[in-house]
Image (spheres, rainbow, N blue to C red):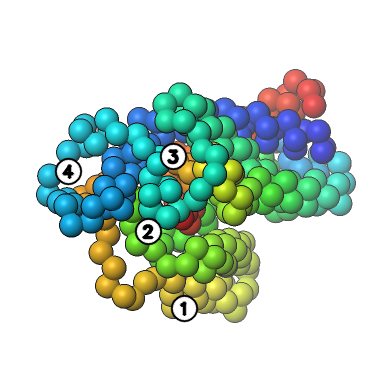
Amino acid sequence: MNTQSYTSTTVPAEGTRSESLKAAALALVLGAGLVFTAGFSHSSTIHNAGHDTRHALSFPCH
Amino acid sequence: MIIRVLSTSLVAGFLAGVLVAVIQHFTTTPLILAAEVFESQAAEAPSLISPAVFRGDDARLILAHADHDAAAGGEEGWAPADGIERTLYTSTVTIATAIGFAFLLLAGLLASGDRIDPQRALMWGAAGFVVTGLAPALGLAPELPGMPAADLIDRQVWWVATAVATGGALWLILRSRSLALQILGVALLVSPHVIGAPHLHGGEVSRVPAELAARFAATSLAVHAVLWAATGLAVGWFWQWTDSTGRA
């Protein structure tokens, strides 16, 4: 039972390794896109909306 | 799997983002608003600035973001009005950043094949803090409005390159069994700092008092650490919860 409990939260139990890697690639693209938009976009509207967050989380600003 | 990744990242990022947005409101944001007073004053009458008279409580009375940018020659165009509107936009962008961090953290966990639980996700969160917080701050200290800084694109390129190099270095050092790859990881870890972050060399003087800047740098790193820790714990917890309940 312990072994089953342990493996139930491992990635391979969710499916094949390739499924995990596909999901990881999608997560990487979405995560990088969100962080870039919030912290690095040169749009003045996005910059002004997120100005305080950029400073607070030490993204380069101004 | 895809739905589970999406739901975990969205929920964990939202929870961590809301927590950090509240913390920001009481820690970093007052310091940013205080710095903007010096920024706008210096733009209007540089010779009258006297950092020695700075008092944080007084400074908070002037919330002149929309004006200061134009006065300081910074970003123009629409900006949220000071007060609740600015707070809501700041909180929204913080939550978006936290969701982005949750996606990145989950991407690393899935690629590694590690077991996903709160403890392990918290350790990945600690690594995330080193990657996006500590390492870039070593070259580019968290900055307040009104502080002199090098070209924005140069700083952004160095920041991203440092984060990528640090992430790759941690992977090689912590997960590789080869000594040569571990040594390569150490070289990768220090290389951005050997190259050096872009800085101004013209002797520009900051408009912001050093005491305020120092407080902000320390506070910013602490907030950054809390964001990664909360994101990691929430990712690990929600991933396990969806597994144990058969949801997602």
Find out whether the residues at labels 1 and 3 contact each other: C-beta distance under 8 Å: no
Please name the amino acid that badge 1 sits on. Ile
Contact between marks 1 and 4 (CB within 8 A): the answer is: no
Q: Amino acid at mark 2?
A: Ala
- Residue picked out by circle 2: B141
Pick whichever of labels 2 and 3 is earlier in the sequence.
3
Host chain of mark 4: B
Q: Is residue B202 above or below residue A59?
A: below
Q: Which residue is mark 3?
A: B66
Q: Residue at x 78, y 48 (%)?
A: A26
Q: CA distance from mark 1 to mark 4?
A: 36 Å
Question: Dot 4 corresponds to which residue?
Answer: B54
Q: CA distance from mark 4 to mark 2?
A: 21 Å
In this rendering, would B50 be left or right of B134? left
Sequence-first tag of 4 and 2 = 4
Q: Residue at x 50, y 33 (%)?
A: B80
- How many C-alpha atoms fall within 10 Å of the one at disc 2: few (<14), some, or many (≥20)? many
Q: CA distance from mark 2 to mark 3?
A: 25 Å
Q: Which mark is residue B195?
A: 1
**Are labels 1 and 3 assigned to the same chain?**
yes
* Quadrant location of the C terminus of chain B in the rendered image: top right
Q: Could you tell me which chain the residue with mark 3 belongs to?
A: B
Q: Residue at x 38, y 49 (%)?
A: B71
Question: Upstream in the sequence, badge 4 or badge 3?
Answer: 4
Q: Nearer the viewer, mark 4 or mark 2?
A: 4
- Chain letter for mark 2, please: B
Counting from the top left corner in percent of width and height, residue B153 is at 54, 65
**In the shown orientation, is residue A34 left or right of residue A15?**
left
As drawn, the label of residue A45 is none
Tags 4 and 2 touching, CB below 8 Å: no
Q: Amino acid at mark 3?
A: Ala
Whichever of labels 1 and 3 marks the residue nearer the N terminus, that label is 3
